[in-house]
Amino acid sequence: MLRRLLKLTTEHAITRHQFGKSLSQFGLIKHKIAQVALDAYVMESMAYMTAGMLDSNAYEDCAVEAAIVKIFSSEACYSGASECLQILGGLGYMKDYPYERMLRDSRILLIFEGTNEILRLFVALMGIQTAGKELRELVKKLRTPFEFPGLVVRKSLERWRNKRAEPKLKLHLDEFLHPSLKGSARKLEYSVLRLQYIVELVLQRHGAKIVDAQQELARVANIVIDIYAMTAVLSRSSRAYCTGMRNAQDEVLMADTVTALAFERVQKNVKELETGMLNNLDCQYLQIADRVFESKGYPIEHPLVRTIW
Ligand SMILES: Cc1cc2nc3c(=O)[nH]c(=O)nc-3n(C[C@H](O)[C@H](O)[C@H](O)COP(=O)(O)OP(=O)(O)OC[C@H]3O[C@@H](n4cnc5c(N)ncnc54)[C@H](O)[C@@H]3O)c2cc1C
């Protein structure tokens, strides 16, 4: 859908003139078009990677990966359809053009085949369940520090580094990618290590009650989705570049951009999870929602009510 929309929308933006220029020359229009192209690239890369994993038989269960692809793709498709309609202006809203139909059709993708809210909880909780099992073993060992002195020192150093947001990069992901993607490989590894840290933190904070901390779980899922997106575009673009595919330079540019954007979001989500509900406005949101439910609607009085008396 996005590839078709990009074709239709670029044709319109090149031929439609406003203020003495074609729409395609305006920065705001270019920004929208680039975002749709970036999202399409992520979607394709995620889908190819996940399908490849399923085909390879090496991965018995790709339910979490499939959920990640579904969440990202449905939301990016809906926002892409909306942005392309916006570029058409008033024409986009008309039934004679395919945009309003595509926007409506893409809206259902966030609801069926598992709503995106439920899938986000699924992605986060499945990962946390695995981390929880590993953590249980770790906590057991940390309770007998004299038996595992090396582990205690390593863990303390790790915590100190994490508090300063400076985890030690040791996976050497850049060795698996083309050298031009070295910076992005480091961002990916940094994000993976921050995810590990934040999952430990939310588990310590909530224990088994983590299932009820939905706003925090959604942030954890968003970090996971961003990491999966980075992994998919970096491996695809690196391979395209190394094998000399046509327009591989564009792929590298897109992968670098996707990674930079995802990295920013990961940092924001980690920060919000670190500060906790009292400081990241989650509590205020819950409180406001409770007031709306209590009032069974908008709770605020009209500003002129007093003067009417
Ligand atoms: C056009 C269309 C085609 C469909 N085709 C099929 C089909 O082929 N096969 C099929 O099985 N179904 C199909 N469905 C049904 C679809 O899968 C459901 O609509 C979807 O699963 C959501 O369920 P619901 O409508 O009962 O919403 P509800 O379960 O009532 O959910 C309403 C909202 O509350 C949220 N919510 C629910 N529980 C929680 C929770 N615990 N925490 C946080 N948020 C929550 C949901 O995310 C959603 O936003 C179709 C629906 C439509 C509209």
Image (spheres, grey):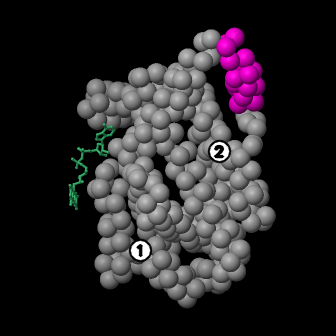
Location of residue 44 with respect to 13 vertically, above or below:
above
Q: Amino acid at mark 2?
A: Ser
Residue at disc 1, secondary structure: loop
In the image, 212 versus 196, the foreground residue is 196
Please, what is the three-letter code of the amino acid marked with disc 1?
Met
- The residue wearing badge 1 is 1
Q: Pick the residue in front: 92 or 223.
A: 223
Specify the quadrant of the image occupied by residue 147: top right
For marks 2 and 1, give the one nearer the viewer: 2
The answer to whether residue 277 is seen in the rendering is no
Residue at mark 2: 191
Q: Which residue is more in the foreground, 19 or 8?
A: 8
In the image, which residues are magenta? 145-164
Magenta stretch contains residue 162:
yes
Counting from the top left corner in percent of width and height, residue 203 is at 51, 26
Residue 248: percent from left, percent from top: 68, 77
Please report the residue visible at 35 percent of the width from the left and 79 percent of the height from the top: 98
The 10 Å Cα crowd at callout 2, few under 14, some 14 to 19, many 20 or more, is many
Instruction: Give the main secondary structure of the magenta stretch.
Output: helix
Query: Which residue shows up at 28% across the image and 26% down it?
Result: 294
